[in-house]
Amino acid sequence: MSEDRLSRVFAALADPTRRDLVARLSSADATVGELAAPYEVSLQAVSKHLKVLEDAGLVSRESRRAPVRLEAEVFDLMTKWIERYQQQAEERYQRLDALLAEMQEDRPTREPAREEDAS
Amino acid sequence: MSEDRLSRVFAALADPTRRDLVARLSSADATVGELAAPYEVSLQAVSKHLKVLEDAGLVSRESRRAPVRLEAEVFDLMTKWIERYQQQAEERYQRLDALLAEMQEDRPTREPAREEDAS
DNA sequence: AAGTTACTCAACCAAATGGTTGACAATCCA
DNA sequence: TGGATTGTCAACCATTTGGTTGAGTAACTT
């Protein structure tokens, strides 16, 4: 696990069991025992998973036996990161479109693409 | 690394070097060599990172020495997953608000909160 | 205060990860 | 065709991860 926040968040969500915990916590808070019950793995294993989620800031608890709560703000962090790339990808397409349009203007009677340009 | 797609995507993005590769590819395609140049690690290490990104469907290449391209569609997959929780979290707050409002209606002259209710 | 229940810590293990170096394969160019 | 360049594969290593069991701690209940 890398040091920075975003790395911890992504690493935490890279495990299906932990994503399932997040899914269940999104409908209601629950104690460690309640959360562990449905899985085949030991309570200790689930406790470890929750620690990973907690270190990533995805969940929190007031005290040991208190119900675990989902921290929804962290999702905004991820969304912000992701949006940059969705947005930039879109901008790239727009730049490409603009460039192609410009090329069309420069040579209205453009010769057809050669073989190598295919595929 | 877990089997399913989403796990591979999150695991791929859990590494800062790989996120940096994604960041750089979002502004322009680049070959393996170009991508590796700025880092202190070996070319082989970067090649491995790119394989992880490729297995996750985040980047692609037409052939060995062809420039690596970012596959923006995968970000939609993540966004969809994340949005579920942002949305559900919001719904929960709304349900809570509604419940509190209802309680207010039931007892217009509600007694003040006791000590334990604080924090 | 004592006992039970709920959870965490510690030590251990197998598998995965991120890095290395060296050899190999494929592609460009002369 | 031959030689340089570019990238991958293989073997290896240290560290991390996700799991186990056993022991310990903390908190309700009585």
Image (cartoon, coloured by chain):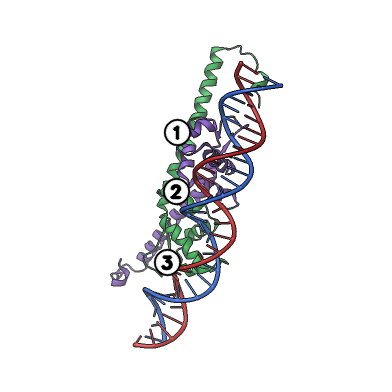
Chain colours: A purple, B green, C blue, D red
- The image position of residue A114, as x and y in percent, is 29, 72
Label 1 marks a residue whose chain is A
**Neighbourhood count class around disc 1 (C-alpha, 10 Å): few under 14, some 14–19, many 20 upward:** few
**Neighbourhood count class around disc 3 (C-alpha, 10 Å): few under 14, some 14–19, many 20 upward:** some
- The image position of residue B9, as x and y in percent, is 45, 51
Where residue B55 sits, quadrant-wise, is bottom left
- B10 and A117: which is toward the camera: B10
Three-letter code for the amino acid on which mark 3 is drawn: Pro
Q: Which mark is residue B67?
A: 3
Label 2 marks a residue whose chain is B
Check disc 1 and report its element: helix, strand or loop.
loop
Picture layout, residue A94 above or below residue A17: below
Residue drawn at x 50%, y 34% is A36
Where residue B62 sits, quadrant-wise, is bottom left
The residue carrying mark 1 is A38
- A42 and A23: which is toward the camera: A42
Label 1 to label 2, Cα distance in Å? 21 Å
Three-letter code for the amino acid on which mark 1 is drawn: Pro
Three-letter code for the amino acid on which mark 2 is drawn: Ser
Look at discs 1 and 2 and give the one toward the viewer.
1
